Amino acid sequence: MAKAFLIVGGTGTGKSTFVKKHLDTIDKKAIFLYDVNAEYKPYFPFPLIELEDFADKATKIENGVIVFEEATIFFSNRSSSDALRKLLVRKRHTNVVVFLIFHSLRTIPRYVYDLCNFVVLFRTNDSRQLIETKFDDERLTDVFDRVQRLSKKQPHYHELFSIY
């Protein structure tokens, strides 16, 4: 069941709601969460730990679900970025499901995209040109176009896109 999901969308588009619906189906003892905005207290009621400690502990989890709320912050710190890479490379061997939540596609390092299985895309403020240039993946560009064409009155619309 090991999978890694990129959840991408602007503020208020439904990212947290999407993740919470999935967490509702999981034993809370199996959830490990980095929650900078305290949005997930019912799922992980523990205090926020240092970024380095969280990244290190996440690489040691087996048979669980790991959520990186505001995943962008892990890439401003080199050792956290290395830990995340290790986690994504080893996910199949540790049987973990990883949710990486981002506000835009432009903040996702290409290697993270390559190491994930799925993208759940909500509306973003990214440009089509950036998507074409950075990811060079017609399937992602097509999904991006469909999601962006929707009315802003449909903020919780998303599409699930398999990278493989």
Image: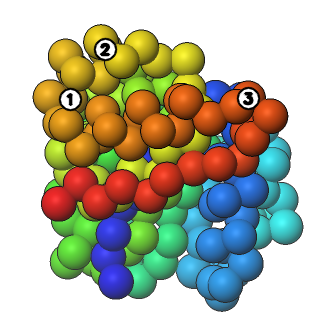
Which is closer to the viewer, label 2 or label 3? 3
**In which quadrant will I find the C terminus?**
bottom left
- Where does the image place residue 110, in percent across and percent down from the top left? 21, 31
Quarter holding residue 163? bottom left
Do tag 2 and tag 3 residues touch (Cβ < 8 Å)? no
Residue named by callout 2: 130
Tell me the residue that label 3 is attached to: 152
**Mark 1 crowdedness (10 Å alpha carbons): few <14, some 14-19, many ≥20:** some
63 vs 81: above or below: below
Rendered residue at 55%/57% (across/down): 67
Q: CA distance from mark 1 to mark 2?
A: 8 Å
75 and 22: which is toward the camera: 22
State how the image is colored.
rainbow
- Position of residue 16 in the picture relative to residue 143 (left or right): right
Q: Callout 2: helix, strand or loop?
A: helix
The residue tagged 1 is: 135
Indicate the secondary structure of the residue bearing disc 1: helix
